[in-house]
Amino acid sequence: MSEVRSKAERAGAAAAVLNRLSTAEKNQALLRMAEALRQKQDEIIAANVEDLERGRQQGTSSSLLDRLALNPQRIDAIAAGLEQIVELPDPVGDELENIERPNGLRIRKYRVPLGVIGIIYEARPNVTVDAAGLCLKTGNAVVLRGGSSALSSNRKIVEVLHGALATTAIPPEALQLIEDPNRSSVDEMLKLNGLLDVVIPRGGSSLIRTVVENATVPVIETGAGICHTYLDETADPVMAEEISINAKVQRPSVCNSMETLIVHQAYAKQHLLALAGTFKEAGVELRGDEETRRIVDWALPVTEEDYATEYNDYILNVKIVESIDEAMQHIAAYGTKHSECIVTADQRHAERFLQEVDAAAVYHNASTRFTDGFEFGFGAEIGISTQKLHARGPMGLPALTSTKYIIHGNGQIRG
């Protein structure tokens, strides 16, 4: 039997135990996990050094090495994240509906765990802990498959967490790590129907596309973000600049950062040149259409491919439009249904944009950077769903649950 199938089966057996545990038992396990991470930080950092050295030898970029790197401060922050999950309400067991039928049947609808969750992600060892904490809190077993560049770190982290879980009510088998670095292990996970209840990809657009196109297991699609900010004709210039700069510059590598700035032509004539100068000072390369380049002569030409690219970098497309309708048409053509923003003083335009733009999060006069579980008040998140079934937007603990109907009768039969 393959490693992938064997570990998925063990996770499934553990899920049956998790389903019986109380919130207090799950929280105690998370606190033990946090404690163990801090106690074993030297061992974790030593394993992480192996990954970093291997990455340097393979020519890994400095930005990716930074995402991969662990130090005492980062490990403490990861442990603190588990402690934050402890403070969040446990959605499992919540009663959602209570129906009394005329025939005397009593129907109750409750939140229950999904079961066994597979998570496929890239070179971020913090995801190993975040995903484990969120899944275990909601009574789900989890099968993790991280990127090969973080294998030493992930292996040590899971070893530490297993040691902690062995002293709790949660069986260590509820947390599984696939160590096979070959692509075939991902392909096998995507087809484990009956063993995995759902797969969640976390990473770049190519990873997400691979999972969505090849999985037979249900998928919750997350992350890919070609986000837009539209500056309407009546946008306040100070507000528009602050929102636009924040949406692009505050952290360009994340999925809720802006990739295209859409500007009404009347606004562009008065304010675009000054706004472009602010972007230039922030180190942002602008790529614009013909009208943009007439106003900002140093902007590079934009292509159709640019509009469809998630840069995650200091690069920004600029498009000038004649109307809100043209702005929304552009978003419909190139957006990934993640986060979209309008900056306007026209309430009618704001309402149209909010109602008609199809995205998980739509903003009026606020940066797209707020699409985040913590910023929404959900605490930790497993990802940001850009699909419509089951969960959409930042996915907190309730998104890792399903529902069950429990029906009480006293002998009713259907005629």
Image: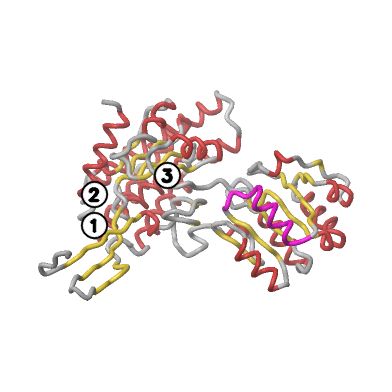
Q: Secondary structure at mark 1?
A: helix
Image quarter where the N terminus lies is: top left
Q: Amino acid at mark 2?
A: Ile
Magenta residues (range): 323-337
**Circle nearer the N terminus (3, 2):** 2
Residue 329, magenta (yes or no): yes
- How far across and how far down the image is residue 113, in percent? 30, 54
Residue 376, magenta (yes or no): no
**Most common secondary structure along the magenta stretch:** helix
Q: Which residue is mark 2?
A: 170
Q: Amino acid at mark 1?
A: Glu
- How far across and how far down the image is residue 355, in percent? 60, 65
Marks 3 & 2, CB-CB < 8 Å contact: no
For mark 3, does the 10 Å Cα neighbourhood hold few (<14), some (14 to 19), or many (20 or more) residues? many
- Which of the labelled discs sits on residue 25, or is there none? 1
Q: Which residue is mark 3?
A: 219
Marks 1 & 3, CB-CB < 8 Å contact: no
Residue 311, quarter of picture: top right
Q: Residue at x 49, y 60 (%)?
A: 374
Is 142 located above or below residue 57 in the figure? Answer: below
Left or right: where 292 falls relative to 313: right
Q: Secondary structure at mark 3?
A: loop
Q: CA distance from mark 2 to mark 1?
A: 8 Å
- Of residues 160 and 200, the one nearer the viewer is 200
Q: Secondary structure at mark 2?
A: loop
Q: Amino acid at mark 3?
A: Val
Is 108 located above or below residue 182 in the figure? Answer: below
- Which of the labelled discs sits on residue 271, or is there none? none
Q: Residue at x 78, y 44 (%)?
A: 287
